[in-house]
Image (cartoon, rainbow, N blue to C red):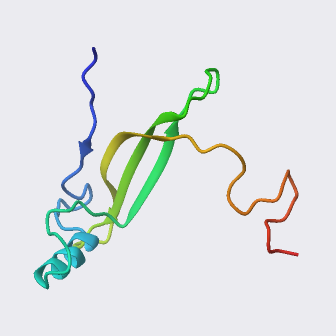
Amino acid sequence: MVESLFPIVFDKCPNCGSTETITKLAWDEQADKGRVDRDTPVAAEHLQLPLLDPKRVIGIVSGILVLSIDWCASCGGRYCTRAEVVDGPVKMGPPPGNTGGPGMMPKGFG
């Protein structure tokens, strides 16, 4: 069995080396007020990329690459803070609100 390379954690800004992110600073401020758990991992954005092979039959569950993205609190640079692979459900069909094929306006427009 192959050992996973994930999660990959980037704990400092690749531009300036700072370990502080804007979201983490705001989260810690809320933790000081007792509103959130300080140890919860946070990021400003989460991108989810399904890891599907179109040549294979799609199952109900697939691997999903989740990228956590934030901004450096020192230089303002945007960078990936964490990359991990999780299992999640495969969503079938058109995107929510879509009414049909190419050229069709989403529901509620027109």
* Image-quadrant location for residue 106: bottom right
Q: Quadrant of the C terminus?
A: bottom right
Decide which of 91, 15 is in the foreground and name it.
91
Decide which of 91, 104 is in the foreground and name it.
91
Is residue 88 toward the left or the right of residue 93 in the image?
left
Is residue 63 toward the left or the right of residue 16 in the image?
right
Is residue 92 toward the left or the right of residue 9 in the image?
right
Is residue 20 toward the left or the right of residue 109 in the image?
left
Find the residue positioned furthest to the front.
60
Find the residue positioned furthest to the left.
32
The residue at 26%/40% (across/down) is 7
Above/below status of 30 relative to 92:
below
Q: Quadrant of the N terminus?
A: top left
* Image-quadrant location for residue 33: bottom left
The residue at 36%/59% (across/down) is 69
The residue at 22%/74% (across/down) is 27
Above/below status of 42 relative to 58:
below
Q: How far across and how far down the image is residue 73, in percent? A: 24, 73
Find the residue positioned furthest to the top.
1
Decide which of 24, 79 is in the foreground and name it.
24
The residue at 19%/80% (across/down) is 35
Q: How far across and how far down the image is residue 80, in percent? A: 34, 54
Q: How far across and how far down the image is residue 28, in percent? A: 16, 75
Q: How far across and how far down the image is residue 94, in percent? A: 72, 50
Q: How many marks?
A: 0
